Image (cartoon, rainbow, N blue to C red):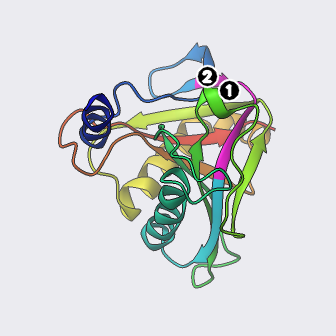
Amino acid sequence: MTSILKTIGSVVSSKGLDKPAYEVLSSEKNYELRRYSPAKWVSYTVKSMKKKEAQTEGFWKLFNYIQGENEKEMKVEMTAPVSTRVEPGAGPNCESTFTVSFFIPPEHQENPPQPKNPNVFIEERPGFEAYVRSFGGFANEDSWVTEAKKLSEDLKEKTSEIRQDFWYTAGYNSPFQLFGRTNEIWFVKK
C-alpha cells in the first residue's frame, strides 16, 4: 500500500523524488551558478524538428526502463528532473538532437540495471558547472526558447565561458501537477 501511495504522490508532485546533487556557487537576480556532482543518468537520444515530440518519445522509453525493462527486471524509482540535452541542428529547418534523461536514484548509482532496449543507455555525466535559470508554469516549445534567450542575454558578458554546442532543459513536475511547477534552463560552463 505504501508503494502505491508513493507512486501516486510522485505523479502529482515532485516532492520526495531524488534529484542530482549540486552546490550553488553564486546567485544572481535571474540565475544561479551551480556545481553538479558526477552522476549516472539513464538516457535516450532522438533526432527531431520538435522538442515536445522528442521528449515524449524519450520519456516513454525511459519510463519503460524504470518500470522493469532492464536486465534485472526491477522497478526503479522515478526521479527529478527529466533533463533534455539539446544539440541544435545546423539551421532552422534541420533536425536537432535531443537526449532525454532520468537521474539514476542514489541506491543504483554504483551499479544501475542495464537497459534491455539497445537504444536506451546509461550515461555517466562528469561533474559540471552550469548557469541555471528557473521558471514556473507549463513549459512548451516557445517558453523553453524564450527562457533560454533570457538566460543568454543575462550571460552576454560570459559567452566565452559557455558551451555553445548544447544546452539542457530540466522539468521537475508531472503533467498532473497544476501549481508550483519548476522548469530550468542549464547552460554548461566550458
Which residue occupies 43% across, 30% down?
Answer: 17
Q: Secondary structure at mark 2?
A: loop
The answer to the question of whether label 1 and label 2 lie on touching residues, with beta carbons closer than 8 A, is yes
Disc 2: which residue: 21
Give the quarter of the image for residue 142: bottom left
Query: Counting other residues with Cα less than 10 Å from the Cα at mark 2, is it few (<14), some (14-19), or many (20 or more)?
Result: few
Q: CA distance from mark 1 to mark 2?
A: 6 Å
Identify residue type, mark 1.
Tyr
Q: Residue at x 64, y 55 (%)?
A: 43
Question: Of the residues under marks 1 and 2, which one precedes in the sequence?
Answer: 2
For the N terminus, give its image quadrant.
Answer: top left
Q: Residue at x 40, y 64 (%)?
A: 141
Q: Main secondary structure of the magenta part?
A: strand
User: What's drawn in magenta, residue-wise?
Assistant: 33-42
Above or below for 11 versus 59: above
**Quarter of the view holding residue 144:** bottom left
